[in-house]
Amino acid sequence: MQSSPSLATAAADLLLGATCPGCGTPSRTVCPTCLRELVPAPRVVLDDPVPIVSGGSHAGTLREVVIAWKEHGRRGLTPVLGHLAASAALELVEAAPAISLVPVPTSRRSRRARGADVVAALATATARLLTDLDVDCATRGLLHMRRQTRDQADLGARERAANLSGAYLASAPRTAPGPRRAVVVLDDVVTTGATLAEAVRALRAAGHPVLGAVTVCSRD
């Protein structure tokens, strides 16, 4: 006899502490009530050096979901956040027949702390959703760390820009028949835009046409 979903969730809560990151009720992911608060609201939050589109604001339930996913190992939340990133990407893709979704690189420090490259996983989930919507989208790890950077949590806009200046290196475009794919850079959260600006600089320096950037949410 199979357990009902409610019994399975309750058992998971007792054994693993599985709760909704938004409200704390027993759930293996975001509960239906909190999920209704995560309706995508894509908007351009910055337009320099490229349009940067976010799927929502880093506040309320979405903020709690991002923290649980990024800092507390709740990898099962990746598809939920990918949905918001995909909604942001849809605001850009009409300008290109095919895109490469390029995640910003993760430092060794962050990868060790989180046990995974969560932004790369987010890019994969986002690309899968876009493909399901008939968008010609491929994920490519074109960006790499040239040098290690400081933790940016307590840095201001100018300090972030200086911290990231020249930190990324991009692989050269592949030589292949047909039109070159436009690049869309992906990150989870945008604050000042310094990380995405450095990513765009590195990609353009390598010869990639950068269409824009997308994030799950923005800190207003």
Image (tube, rainbow, N blue to C red):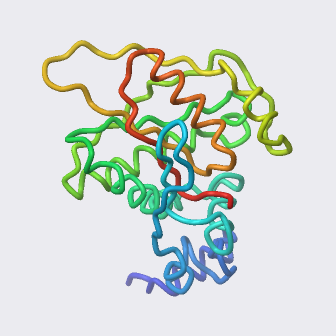
| Residue pictured at 67% horizontal, 29% vertical | 107
Q: Is residue 159 left or right of residue 62?
A: right
Q: Position of residue 113 (x, y in %)?
A: 73, 39
The residue under the point 54% across, 80% down is: 37
Q: Quadrant of the N terminus?
A: bottom left
Q: Residue 151 appears in which quarter of the rendering? A: top right
- How many marks are shown on the rendered structure? 0
Q: Give above or below for 25 relative to 62.
A: below
Side (left or right) of 178 relative to 84: left
Between residue 205 and residue 40, name the one nearer to us: 205
- Quarter of image, res 66: bottom right
Picture residue at 75% right of the left edge, 26% below the top? 149
Q: Position of residue 163 (x, y in %)?
A: 76, 27
Q: Nearer the viewer, residue 2 or 73?
A: 73
- Outermost residue, right side: 154
**Can you name the residue that lies furthest to the front here?**
48
Q: Quadrant of residue 22?
A: bottom right
Residue 81 image point, x, y percent = 50, 60
Query: Which residue corresponds to the image point at 53% horizontal and 36% vertical from the top-left?
Result: 49
